[in-house]
Every structure is written in C-alpha cells, then in structure tokens.
Amino acid sequence: MSSFAESWSQHIADVPKTCSGMHYNESAARLRVLLKSGVLRLTDIKNNPEHFFEAHDLLSQYATTVGPGFGIRFTVQYNLFAGTIMALGNPDQVAALDTMQAEGVLGCFCLTERLAGVSSGLAVDTTCEWDDSRQMFLLNCPDEGAKKNWISQGLTADKAVVVATLFVKSKSYGPHAFVMDLRKNGELVPGVTAEDMGDKTIGNDLDNARINFSNVWLPKTALLDRYGGIEAGDYVQHKPGTANIDMIGQRLYTGRAVIASSTLFFARNLYARTREYTDNKKCWQPKGTLMLSDVPQLSTLFEEADHELRRVEALRDLVAKRLSECLRADVLPDSKLVEMVTVLKVKAIETSIALCFRLKQELGSYALMGGTGFEKMDYLQCCKFAEGDSRILMQKLARDRLMEFKDNQTGSQQEAAICTELGMALMAGGKKAWNEKWKLVYKLADTVIERVVDEVAAPSKL
C-alpha cells in the first residue's frame, strides 16, 4: 500500500461509524474535517490523479456499510465542484481552491435541471446574461423546468459551480460554468432558494436539493474563463478549438469512472461478506454436513462472479490509467477513451446489479437481515442514473457505432449485421424507426460493450 493510501485509509477509517444513518448536516461536517486535513488536495485531480482515483476506491470499500451518501458527497466536492474549477478556471480561480480547502468550504455542482441536463445531452435552460453597463452577470432560471434538480450537497454547500447558457448582447454562447457564493454565514444569498428533494430509499445522509436562481447578480470574476471570457464587452474565445462545454463534459468522464469503480467494490464486498457467512454455515446432507458455500448453485455463482468482476476490473484499471494521463497533461480524452469510459459505466453497474441480485436470490432469509449489505443494494440503482443515465449512454454507443459503420463498413460480423439492419430500418422509416427498433439499438450497444470489455480482458487471460 502506498504512503498516500495508508494516510488516506487512516483519515477515513471512522466513516462506517460516523456516516451511517446520520443527518446530512453531520455528514457535511465530516467532509469539512476530511477536506481540512489536506491529505487529498482539491488540486490532485490534475496534479496527482492517481491519488484522486485511489481515494475514491478506498472510500468505496465502505459502500455496503454506509450506502452511497458520503461517497457521492465526496466526489461532488472533489470531482464536480473543484474539478470543474481546475479544468475551466483561470490561475486566480484555481489558486482560490487552496483557501477553500484550508477553510473547509463545501461546494456543489448545479448542472441538471428539471427538464434538461445530462440525459438530454447537456442541454441547459438556466441563463446567465452579461450586463456591460454593470460589468456583471445576471443569473436566472426562467421557468420551473430550468430549476436545478437533484443537486447533491445543495442544502449545505457554501459555494456552487453553476452551469448556465451564457448570453452576451442577446447572443447565446452555449453552456458555461460560473463559480458563486451560494451561502454566506450559512444563509442563502439573495435571489437563491433551495428545497429538499425529500426522503429517498437510500442515501438520506446526503442532502439533495432543487435550487432556483432569480435575478442573481454575479461579478465578472464568477465566469470560469480559462477558455473563453468577456473582453471589452464582447465574448472572446481564449483557446480556439476548445469549448467550455467540452471541459465541463470531462468532469462527467471522471465521475463515470469513479462511480463505475464504486459499484465493483460494492459487489466485491457484498460477495466477500456473504462468503464469510456461507463458509461457516452448515447445511444438512444424508451423510455428514455440507457448508453452504459448497452448495452447487452458490459455489458456481461465486466462481462466475469472480470471473465477471475481474473482466470489468481490467477495463476499470485501464480507464483510470488513461484518464490520469489526460488529466495530468490537461488534454481531452480521445474518442476511444470516451467509448471505454461509457462502456465501463454501463457494464460495471449492470454486472454488479445482476450479480448482487443473483446472490440475494440464493441466500433466503439471510439476505433480508439488516447489516448484511443487501439492504444497501439501492446504492447500485442510484449509480445507474448518476453522471449519465445508462440507457442514454447505451443509445449514444449505438449511435456512434452506427455512424462509424456508415463511414467505413468495418467491425465484427455481429456488429456489422446489426448496423446493416438498423441502418436499413432508418432509411425506410426515418427517425421514428430508432424508437421502433429500440431493442435492436440496445442489442447493438450490448455488442459494442462486450467487444470493448473482451479487448481489454483478453490480454489479461482472465
């Protein structure tokens, strides 16, 4: 274990006791303590990305004990909030992260909206308009659908990174990120309201909020303007060819990777805890006794689960390695890596859900007992929709593969056959055929997913 891992493990050792079943205010206070410790820096997502991924993985070891609440709070702070500032901020904005860390300042990430957000392709209806006479931005949610929805840490955060469509001289420049004070001295700033999303089936130690902005004035320095900002009253692209929305999207890549990894840890830990029980549970047989672990359906499942998890873990490790290289070099992932991240997000979660559900069905009343980890299985359901709905991601995989096939007609025989059938349906029926052939769309995505996993797992001879 690395020196960082040892230190980090010591600082999070109390998480199972302190974060299980607590109120979200207490959970937020625990993160402030962890933040102030400085063991993992807010800037490590770029400067030490291996620490960033390792910290997430070590915290995920507690998933079957505490559920998703604290883990989501943690990744919102380090990946979505601080990571966006690191990716889009100018030197002064990035330098401010050190002060925030020393003071234990909590942040949230306001992207998703009631009627827009990740599932709709990063569509954003919240607006932020430049007022040249005041040298300020005016932030607004123009209607109910534009209210920011399911904002993790939204009831306790001091600051927020808000994604809004930027308007300059009535012209839209697309989604941009702004950093702002959400609360001062614990009170929401004027023009901001926040309401609790209500009780959830799991993770109630995490505050999820619906946030509305009504005529909120922001200073010029609020715009994270590394790649584009306001100069002499006009919008100026500082780095041609790199759009703000691309760098905002990169936070989703890292988020998808750590969420996918956390589900693999959940499944591993659930199987390990269950195996400890079944190894010591005696069953009757005509002669002598039999341990529950040796019952054929369970022993076979343990072997299958280990094999399937190792296949996906190989992809996870490769994705973390390549994303770390991109983060350190401050470059966007190429299309192949983006595909791998998407595949990992879908495959890890679906594999974990399937394996954990199968295990639950084989254990009878034990799986109904509190404290076994099975009561936390909605953790996996939560991950399925976080940082991009799995179904939406599968549709993107299918669409990208179909476009690639249209251009070069390459790929496996199975993929080629599905692309041909789907392409002919679209030519005959137009866009509506995509929905009519939805089973074929997901079949194509599944085929791509299995190919990508096999390409990585095969060299490892799993």
Image: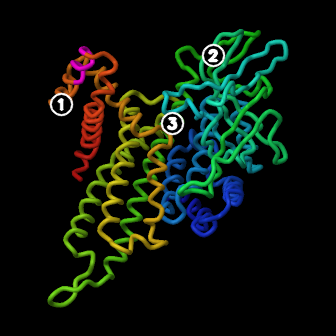
Q: Nearer the viewer, residue 104 or 76?
A: 76
Marks 3 and 1, how far apart at CA: 29 Å
- Three-letter amino acid code of the residue under disc 1: Ser
User: For residue 423, what is the image quadrant?
Assistant: top left
- Three-letter amino acid code of the residue under disc 2: His
Say left or right for 462 vs 240: left
Q: Is residue 178 magenta?
A: no
Location of residue 460 in the rendering, given as x and y in whole percent from the top left corner? 25, 49
Marks 2 and 1, how far apart at CA: 42 Å
In the displayed structure, 380 sits above or below 42; it is: below
Question: In the rendering, which numbered label is found on residue 238?
Answer: 2
Q: Nearer the viewer, mark 2 or mark 3?
A: 3
Label 3 SS: helix
The residue at the point 45 percent across, 43 percent down is: 257
Residue position marked by numbered label 3 in the rendering: 252
- Confirm whether residue 309 shows in the render: yes
Q: Nearer the viewer, residue 290 or 34?
A: 290
- Three-letter amino acid code of the residue under disc 3: Leu
Number of numbered discs: 3
Number of other residues with Cα within 10 Å of mark 3, as a class: few under 14, some 14 to 19, many 20 or more: some
Badge 2 or badge 1: first in the primary sequence: 2
Residue position marked by numbered label 1 in the rendering: 412
The residue at the point 68 percent across, 53 percent down is: 35
Location of residue 18 in the rendering, given as x and y in whole percent from the top left corner? 64, 67
Location of residue 49 in the rendering, given as x and y in whole percent from the top left corner? 53, 43
Number of other residues with Cα within 10 Å of mark 1, as a class: few under 14, some 14 to 19, many 20 or more: few
The residue at the point 51 percent across, 33 percent down is: 118
Say left or right for 367 vs 120: left
User: In the image, which residues are magenta?
Assistant: 422-428
Q: Is residue 426 magenta?
A: yes
